[in-house]
Every structure is written in structure tokens, then in C-alpha cells.
Amino acid sequence: MPQQVRIYRPAKNAMQSGRANTRRWILEFEPSDRKEPDSLMGWNGSRDTQSQVRLRFDTQEQAIAHAEREGYVYVVIEDKPAKAPRPKNYADNFRFDRVA
């Protein structure tokens, strides 16, 4: 049975003001084993080491080509279009018709 992977671009982190880390595409393996708590420590873990692998590509086409070359079944998750930021003027804070 071929491995299942998903290809997507990560969302912008809430702590970022720019979009530098959102330009690359990520190929990530779907989990093939469920996580179970460890009997000694109680931490969650599984025997699935593929779920720890994240491959980064510059373009979506490179990620798809790699998935096809390796024989993976892939799903491409398209990102939602970002809303354009509203232009703001500092002088608008002091307008007479401003709603408080």
C-alpha cells in the first residue's frame, strides 16, 4: 500500500509580521499508526517514524514531482487567499467624525 502524503504551504505564524516562512511548500506524511501513552512516562508516542518527516520544496511542482517519483499518494491543500490589509492613516485617529 503506497504512503499517503499531503502537500501544503504553512500558514503565517501569529508571532510573525512578514510572510518569509510561508513561501515554501511542505510534503508531510499522513500518520499510519495511532499514538499510545508510554507505560513508564505516560508520554504519547507511536512506532510511526514517517510522521516526523517534513520535506520542504521551493515550488508546488517540485513537491508533486517528488511524490510521484517516490510513488506516494498525495493530496494538495490549496491555501486560502489572504485578505488585503486595510490602509491606515495616523491622522484618522484625530478626525472629528471618528467613532470612539
Image (cartoon, rainbow, N blue to C red):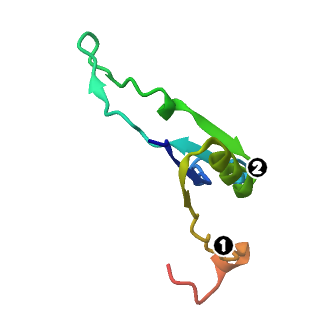
Q: Position of residue 69 (x, y in %)?
A: 67, 45
According to the picture, the residue beneath numbered tag 1 turns out to be 85
Of label 1 and label 2, which has the lower sequence position?
2
Q: In terms of depth relative to the viewer, which is nearer, 20 or 15?
A: 20
Secondary structure type for disc 2: loop
Assess disc 2: are there few (<14), some (14-19) or many (≥20) residues with their C-alpha within 10 Å of its C-alpha: few
Q: Amino acid at mark 2?
A: Asp
Q: Amino acid at mark 1?
A: Pro
Report the quarter where the N terminus lies. top left
Q: Which mark is residue 58?
A: 2
- The residue at 58%/64% (across/down) is 79
State the residue lying farthest toward the top: 40
Secondary structure type for disc 1: loop
Q: Position of residue 82 (x, y in %)?
A: 62, 70
Q: Position of residue 68 (x, y in %)?
A: 64, 50
Assess disc 1: are there few (<14), some (14-19) or many (≥20) residues with their C-alpha within 10 Å of its C-alpha: few
State the residue lying farthest toward the front: 1
